[in-house]
Amino acid sequence: MMEPEELEAYKKAGKICGAARDYGAGLIKDGARAVEIAEAVEKRIFELGGKLAFQTTVNLNDVAAHYAPLLDDTLTIKSTDYVKLDCGVHVDGWIADTAITIRPAGRDKLIECSEKMLAVALPMFRPGTVIEEISAAMEDVAKEFKLKPVSNLTGHSLERWTVHGGIVIPCVRGSAPKVLSEDEVYGIEPFVTTGKGMVKDSPPPTIFRWIADRPQRDVTARQLLLAAKSDWQRLPFAKRWAQEKFGNVDLVLNRLIKDGSLWAYNTLKEVSGKPVAQTEHTVIVADKPVVITR
């Protein structure tokens, strides 16, 4: 049984995360700069009493995930763009994760499909449900819309201080025999596309995470590693945050990746260059599933 203080922390994180997502969605307009949207969402999270579980990403069109705008980023929204806004909040390490796709020119079946895939999945997060049943249900929705779910991006379990807890929720059929248990927490995020339904790594990375301390001669390298552990609490962080604290960090980041101090997350793009839509909520497994990011 989940402890009352843990449940309250999850609910608080979810409420803040959902409010920040909705605030950010209202900023997604023709001519808006991606970096200004990301910074505004992160500022809002702090204002509402939360802390960042990971960097806010603003992913356009064929970019499915993992693009955190840089400090002086010139990326600008166009009315026909599919803009995926993904943000995370933690309260004392308990994490909520949510995402939405906005197209300033208007919604279409790609966005509607992703939203329906999520709507079908959420009520299934009850004790005893087998994950592959959820995956099959989401894929059936995509087939109904004659679209392709992204097969190599998945939802995931959430643990304290850990965004990806090790259990995955695919949105395509396959062997996933894990049975859900009460009080498990998941970020459910169906991705769907008009393309081939696969994503690929697309360097350079804009997101990093501390994985180990290694001896560093360079002062900036030592300071950045300390920030990754203390300021960002070993959770994923944006290159933009490092730029704000330390200036030009390209050489330092490359060195820290090479020696195994940091993990780098490459931007993920749909392999055929077609647009992707994503919708995500965080849900606690229960007889009546508790969706905390609505």
Image (spheres, rainbow, N blue to C red):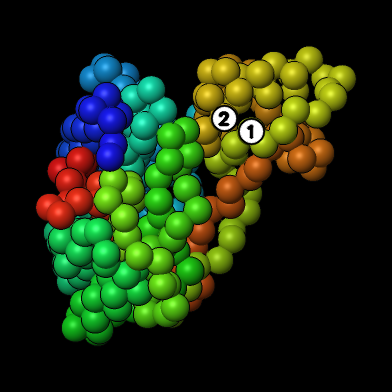
Q: Position of residue 107 (x, y in %)?
A: 15, 61
- Look at the image and tell me in which quarter the C terminus lies: top left
Q: Position of residue 84 (x, y in %)?
A: 32, 51
Q: Is residue 203 found left or right of 125 in the rendered image?
A: right
Please tell me whether mark 1 sits on a helix, a strand or a loop. strand
- Look at the image and tell me in which quarter the N terminus lies: top left
Bin the neighbour count of mark 1 within 10 Å (Cα to Cα): few under 14, some 14-19, many 20 and up.
many
Q: Is residue 194 found left or right of 62 in the rendered image?
A: left
Seen at 68% across and 24% down, the residue is 225
Q: Is residue 255 in sight in this rendering?
A: yes
Label 2 vs 1, first from the N-terminus: 1
Seen at 23% across and 20% down, the residue is 48
Q: Nearer the viewer, residue 180 or 140?
A: 180
Q: Position of residue 79 (x, y in %)?
A: 24, 54
Q: Which mark is residue 210?
A: 1
Q: Which mark is residue 283?
A: none
Q: Amino acid at mark 1?
A: Trp
Q: Which residue is mark 2?
A: 234
Seen at 40% across and 66% down, the residue is 178
Q: Amino acid at mark 2?
A: Arg
Q: Nearer the viewer, residue 235 or 256?
A: 235
The residue furthest front is 1
Q: Is residue 121 found left or right of 72 in the rendered image?
A: left
Please tell me whether mark 2 sits on a helix, a strand or a loop. loop
Q: Is residue 105 in sight in this rendering?
A: no
Q: Position of residue 110 (x, y in %)?
A: 23, 69
Q: Nearer the viewer, residue 250 or 174?
A: 174
Seen at 21% across and 59% down, the residue is 126
Give the image quarter of residue 17: top left
Marks 2 and 1: CB-CB under 8 Å? Answer: yes
Q: CA distance from mark 2 to mark 1?
A: 5 Å
